[in-house]
Image: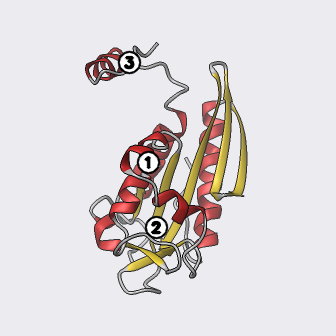
Amino acid sequence: MTPEPQVVTPESAFEEAIVDAVRDLVREARCGCVVVPKFGLDVALFIGTERGAFARFLEVKVYAAGRLAGVGFGTPGGAGPQVELLLNTDSDLRIVDDTIRWVLADATRPRGSARYALFDSRAARAAAMGEVRRGKQNNLRIGALAKGYMPWTDLLQELRRFLFAPVEPPTNDQRDAAQAKGAPRLT
């Protein structure tokens, strides 16, 4: 297992730790994977398995109290792929739920504590300070995300689930739940 990083600031250091952790998870899963940092979002993964290839994207954020109770996303001028992503409706964001996650480290909390979060784009938009808009600095409210904080080992487990869910055949419970929601039968 990848050890918890000693430091998570600046954000590039946490991004590097996440890329290293993801590469370790891919090695453990014994599947082909191409990791491409800075592919629109912070990290792109293209994973090849016997069931086919699929993509995963991570947006990495670090809260270091640089902004009171918030961490910025996009450019200071309100542009960038994160802003464009979060301008979509909930139903459109559901489309990317299987492929995009946001990873947050709270550098104001001590190493070894619950200070990491993994969340989807709908949760990111819900945590935004005010409305997500072009032309202004957009921020995530840390208070809205802190309730989902977890320790490093739990973050790695959640990352593993997110990265490799399509690799593992669905369980009978997953098939039944999907069918109950009116989804096509999972095979």
Q: Residue at x 52, y 73 (%)?
A: 134
Q: Residue at x 59, y 43 (%)?
A: 56
Q: Could you tell which of marks 3 and 1 lies nearer the N-terminus?
A: 1
Q: Could you tell which of marks 1 and 2 lies nearer the N-terminus?
A: 1
Residue 159, horizontal then vertical, whole percent: 49, 46
SS label for mark 1: helix
Residue kind at label 1, given as amino acid type: Leu
Residue 127, horizontal then vertical, whole percent: 34, 66
> In which image quadrant can residue 54 be found?
top right
* As drawn, 68 above or below 126: below
Label 1 vs label 2: CA separation?
A: 23 Å
Numbered circle sitting on residue 105? 2
In front of the other: 176 or 11: 176
Comparing labels 1 and 2, the label whose residue is closer to the camera: 1
Numbered circle sitting on residue 171? 3
Residue 63, horizontal then vertical, whole percent: 45, 75
Residue 19, horizontal then vertical, whole percent: 64, 55
Label 3 vs label 2: CA separation?
A: 32 Å
Numbered circle sitting on residue 93? 1
Q: Residue at x 49, y 31 (%)?
A: 165
Residue kind at label 3, given as amino acid type: Thr
In front of the other: 39 or 112: 39
